[in-house]
Amino acid sequence: ATVSRGAVSAGYPVVQANGVYGNAEPPYPTSTSWTYEAGFKTLWLDKRLGLNGSVFYNDVKNGHLIVFDATQSYFGTTSLDYRSKGVELEAVASLSPTLKLSAGIGYTDAELVDVPAGSSTGAKSGNRVPNMPKLNASLGVHYEAPVHIGHAEGRLKAALAWQYVGRRAADVKESFELPGYGVVNARIGWQHGRWEIYAFAWNLLDKQYLVAGQAWTTGVSSVRLGQPRVVGIGATLRF
């Protein structure tokens, strides 16, 4: 179990709206938080199955959130209080000396609190924190075994993972909801001593999904698509 205190320093918006008029740009304040967490880690079936879990509660004051100012047509940073609580569960099973299966699921309830009445942001107490899904999940298969290439002795490593992100509020006003999505990522590599060469594919199935959204005016909104399939190769040297 842990209790921690956090802080994110104050700052200034990336886009200035007052400088052009010769006026000072107001900064946003330092954000502070209290975080409480309790969890467990266990091993079962002769250490072939690991089960881990945790519950958490976060209390954030002056959290830094991005909002759209319709009166000046620009994105700025606002400070709003919010609280989040949730639970996470994870399992890792060794199906054989070379094959592992992993799975995880999480639930988070994050909402704005103590929002001043008539806030210019359009936010209200009880609204969901934007882009924070209530549900997230993952599934993964991991394979690792000795493999010789010529006279070189090394290890083949391969992983296939599915990640799911649930529905989220697009902004602090809860103007609309972004749908949930799942993507598949893959990686295969060969490690020899300190060297590893690998190939990867993010969003292997070239899934089209939404990562952000914004309401401009009544009935006019926009969304941003997530990254399409990315395939590449790389090498790593550890020393």
Image: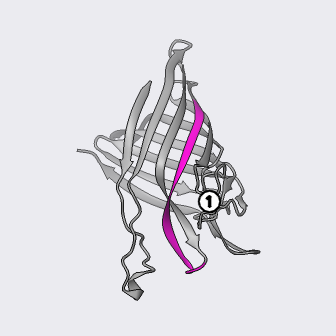
Q: Would you say 115 lies left or right of 238 here?
A: right
- Label 1 SS: loop
Q: Would you say 220 lies left or right of 26 here?
A: right
- Farthest-out residue, front: 117
Residue type, mark 1 in image: Val
The vertical placement of 206 against 46, above or below, is below
Which residue corresponds to the image point at 60% horizontal and 52% vertical from the top-left?
129
Whether residue 150 appears in this view of the structure is: no
Residue 131 occupies quadrant: bottom right
| Secondary structure mostly taken by the magenta-highlighted segment of the chain | strand
Whether residue 54 appears in this view of the structure is: yes
Which residue corresponds to the image point at 44% horizontal and 24% vertical from the top-left?
1
Counting from the top left corner in percent of width and height, residue 12 is at: 38, 68
Which residue corresponds to the image point at 38% horizontal and 81% vertical from the top-left?
23
Of the pair 205 and 181, the residue shown nearer to us:
181
Q: Is residue 76 within the magenta segment?
A: yes
